[in-house]
Amino acid sequence: MKKDKLVSEYIDKLNQEQVPDKGLWAEEEVKELTDVIRALKNLDEPVCPKEGFEKQLSDTRWRAYHEAGDKNIDNDTQQSRLSSGDIKGMKNKKKSGKKHNIAPAFWGVAAAAAVFLGVFYLKDSLLPVDNPVYAMEQSYEKANAYHGIITVTSINGEGRRSAQAVREVWADKEGRYYVKELQGMEEGLITANNNKEKWQKKKEVNYISLSPSFPDNYSFTFEIGKEIKDIKEAEEVKEAEKVIIGGRQAVLYKVTPKGGDSYRLWIDKKTGVPLKKLTAAVNGIAYEIRYADIDYTDGIPEEYLSYGDLTGYVVNRNDSWQLCATLEEAENLSGFSSKLPDISDTSYSLIEIAANTGEKAIKLYYGHDGQDNKVAVVEKAALAKEETGRAVTGSIGSMKAEIITDAVAAGSVAVAEAGSIAAESLGQQTDITSVRWQQKGREYQVMGNGSMDEINVFIKALTGSKAVLAKTKENTPQIKVDYDIKTEEETQKSVDAGHQPWRLDPAFVAQVFTSLLIYPEGITGDYPIPYEDFKIIKNSGSSVEIQVDNKKSPASKVYLKQLVRQDSTGIWTAVGYDKNKNYEK
C-alpha cells in the first residue's frame, strides 16, 4: 500500500511540473518504477512559459535590482515588495511546522529560464524601472520603417549652441535608408542605400558618388536600430529624471557604454520612441540630436530608393571619401577622433566635413564668407611617410615638415587628396600651398589656395608653431647657363597673362632645357627624354635641383631658380647643369 501511494504521489508531482520530494523516489523498492516513469514523462512535449513570461521575468528581476538600491520607491512598487517582516514571518511559519516549501530546484529552473531568454533579458535586468530596451524594441518591432526630421546642434564647453544640420531620414529594417540634408553646411546632399548601390548626390552641383551597398559603414546620427543595439550593449543604464519634451512625457537615461564616456538619451514614456540624445563631449564639443518629428511607416517610398536620371551629372564610382553632416559622424566612419584647430579669432569657418573609411582619415574644409580662399585640413593615422618629389624640407617646431609651394605640384596633390564633392572648390585651384607632417602617431596635411601666412594660422592652431623652410646650402652647377633677366621678366608677364603655363613647372622646364641640349635647332615631335625621368631631389622654395635618370640625357642634373618672383606664380629658369658621365648619344 505504501508503495502504491509513493508512486501515485510521484506521478502527481510530475504532472504538476514540480520536482518530486526525494522521499518519493529514493526508496529502493520504488526507485526502479520511478526511473521508468521519468523516462516516459520525458517523451511528453515540453511545457513552455505562457505569453508575456519573458517580460514578466525581466520586469521582476530589474525591479528587484532597482528596489535594492533606491529608497525613493513609489506606492505601487512599495506594495509589491516583500518587507523584512514578511520574510521573518515566513521563517517563523516554517519553524511552526506549517509547510511553505520553496523548492531548491526553483532557482535552477530560473537560471535555465534566464539562459533560455538569452543575454537580452539578462542585460535588461540591470536597467531602471521603466525598462528602456524593452520599450524601444517593442515600438520598433511594430513597423517596417520610420520617417523623421532630425535636428543636430553642437554645444561647446561654455554652453554656446550652434545649429549644425536639419535632415529628413527614412530607414527600414532591411538596412535601406534615404537621408536628405535640409539645412546646414551640406544642404541638399542626399545619402542613400537601396541594398544594391549606395550613393551621395548633390543636385546643385550635378555630382553623384556611387559605391557598392556593402560594406557600408555609414550610420546617420540617431539611427534608431543602432541606438537600440548600443543601449543593449551598454555597461550601465540609469534613469535620471522624467521630463516633458515637445509636449510628450519622456524619461531621461544616463547611458555608459563599455570603455566609453556616458551620454544621455530621452525616450518617450508612452511609445518607447527615442526623442533626443546628448553625446559625450569630444574636444570640448557635444552634440544634441533630436527628432523634431518621427513616425513609424510601412516602408520607404520607392522614388527615394533610386537616384534617378544622371544625365548631365559628374559620376564618380571610385570616391572613397564620404561627406558627413557632423564631426561625430566623421569620427564614427574613420574610427578615431579629430583634433579641431581653434580658429575662433579668424574669419574662417568650417564649411564641410568628409571621412574616408579605407584610409581612416578625416578632412575638414574651411572657407571665408564671400571669398574664394579655402583651406583643407586632413588628419589620418600615420604610416611610413612617402616623400613628395617637389616638396621643400621644412620644420614645425621640432617636427620635420614637407612643404609644397609651387602651384603645379601642390595643385596636383590637392586634387589627389581631395577626392570628394568638396574638392570641386579646392581641387580646381592652381595656386595651392600644402604642408604635411607627422605628430603623435598621426599625419596631418594643411593645404589651401591662400597665402602661406593663412596656412600657418591652421598649422599653429594644431601644433603651437608655424611651418618654416629649412635653410639649405645651394650646390654649384658644373656648367653655368647664361640668362637675360629682362627676357625673364617679359616671360613672367606672358605667363601671368595665361601663356606658356609650363614655365611654372620646374620639371617641365628641365625637360625642355635638356631636350634643347640634344636638339639645339629645336624640338620636333615627342621630347627625347620622358617627363617621368626628371625628379626633384632638392627644393629650397625658390631654387630646385632636378636629377635626370636617363643615359640619353647629356645632363645628369639641372639647376633652376625663380629669378623674377619667388612664390607659386613665379616662373622657373635653368641656371646650370651637371654633365652626365654615362651619356649615350
Image (cartoon, grey):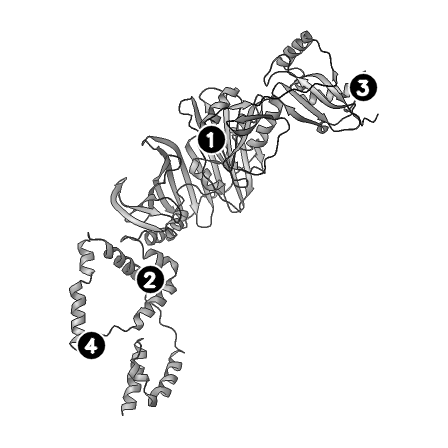
Label 1 environment density (alpha carbons within 10 Å; few <14, some 14–19, many ≥20): many
Q: Dot 1 lies on which element? A: strand
Q: Which residue extends farthest top?
A: 486
Q: Is residue 561 visible?
A: yes
Task: For marks 2 and 1, give the one nearer the viewer.
Answer: 1
**Residue labelled with disc 2:** 54
- Vertical placement of residue 340 versus 225, above or below: above
Kindly identify the residue that appears in the image at 69 percent across and 24 percent down. Answer: 546
Give the CA separation, mark 4 to mark 1: 74 Å
- Residue 118, percent across and down? 39, 61
Residue bearing mark 1 = 352
Which corner quadrant holds the C terminus? top right
> Which quadrant of the figure has residue 57?
bottom left
The kind of secondary structure element at disc 3 is loop
Q: CA distance from mark 2 to mark 1?
A: 47 Å
Residue at the disc numbered 4? 99
Q: Assess disc 3: are there few (<14), some (14-19) or many (≥20) residues with their C-alpha within 10 Å of its C-alpha.
A: few
Amino acid carrying mark 2 in the image: Glu
The answer to whether residue 523 of the structure is visible from this angle is no
The Cα–Cα distance between marks 4 and 2, rounded to whole angstroms, is: 29 Å
The disc, 3 or 2, on the residue closer to the chain's N-terminal end is 2
Please identify the residue farthest to the right as the structure is shown. Answer: 585
Residue at 80% across, 16% down: 520
The answer to whether residue 283 is left or right of residue 361 is: left
Residue 519 disc label? 3
> What amino acid type is highlighted by mark number 4?
Lys
